[in-house]
Amino acid sequence: MGFALSDMQLESSAFSQGGAIPRKHTGEGDDVSPALSWRGAPEGTKAFAVICHDPDAPLVAPNGTYGFVHWVLYNIPASVSELPEGVSDYTAGQSDFGRPGYGGPMPPEGHGVHNYFFWVLALDSDSKLPEGLSLMDFLRKVEPHVIGMNRLVGTYQRG
């Protein structure tokens, strides 16, 4: 699967690009998703999805994927351009914690700083996908419909 960045912009009131993710949004804190907002969606956008992935996690799955999936959220209408902290709306996919919904950063102790990639994807289809899709199953279904995307990277290191 190949994706290219677009002119969309993704930001958070909780942390800046390359900045530290507050403990509140981690597995060591309240474990609530950070507020996110985006702008610059391409014409023809009918839905959005948000993903959080840690490529620094020292894990490789049997299917060849790597890292750790912290969040897959989809079926977000095109009229939405922000998610509040702790959002519970829309459809949650399966995280690598083995449950749907957001699971905050919590790298192994002594593993150093990890980068957490928060992605927003603009889709040209608003077909309703079922709850609980893994990241790979979700991406297989939406790849032909991705018309824009960008990321916000935050960092976290366990205390």
Image (cartoon, rainbow, N blue to C red):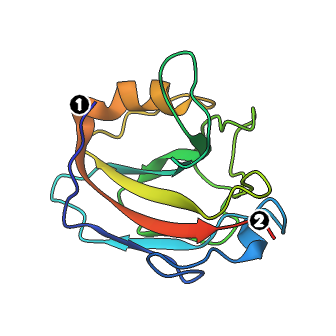
Secondary structure of the residue carrying numbered label 2 = loop
Side (left or right) of 43 relative to 38: left
Side (left or right) of 73 relative to 102: left
Q: How many labels does the image show?
A: 2
User: Where does residue 68 sit, x and y in percent of width and height?
Assistant: 60, 41
Earlier along the polypeptide chain: callout 2 or callout 1? 1
- Extreme left residue here? 43
Task: Tell me the residue that label 2 is attached to.
Answer: 158
Write the residue at 18% across / 60% down. Answer: 42
Task: Tell me the residue that label 1 is attached to.
Answer: 144
Write down the quadrant of residue 10 in the picture: bottom left
Above or below, 151 against 67 in this view is below
Contact (Cβ within 8 Å) of mark 2 with mark 1: no
Q: Mark 1 belongs to which amino acid?
A: Pro
User: Where does residue 159 sit, x and y in percent of width and height?
Assistant: 81, 71
Q: Mark 2 belongs to which amino acid?
A: Arg
Q: Is residue 124 visible?
A: no
User: Where does residue 156 sit, x and y in percent of width and height?
Assistant: 65, 68
Above or below, 156 against 69 in this view is below
Quadrant where the N terminus sits is: top left
Write the residue at 51% across / 77% down. Answer: 12
Above or below, 99 against 9 in this view is above
State the CA–CA distance, disc 2 to disc 1.
37 Å
Side (left or right) of 3 relative to 25: left
Q: Nearer the viewer, residue 122 or 65?
A: 65
User: Where does residue 146 sit, x and y in percent of width and height?
Assistant: 26, 42
Q: Local crowd at mark 2 within 10 Å, few (<14), some, or many (≥20)?
A: some
Write the residue at 53% across / 69% down. Answer: 154
Write down the quadrant of residue 40 in the picture: bottom left
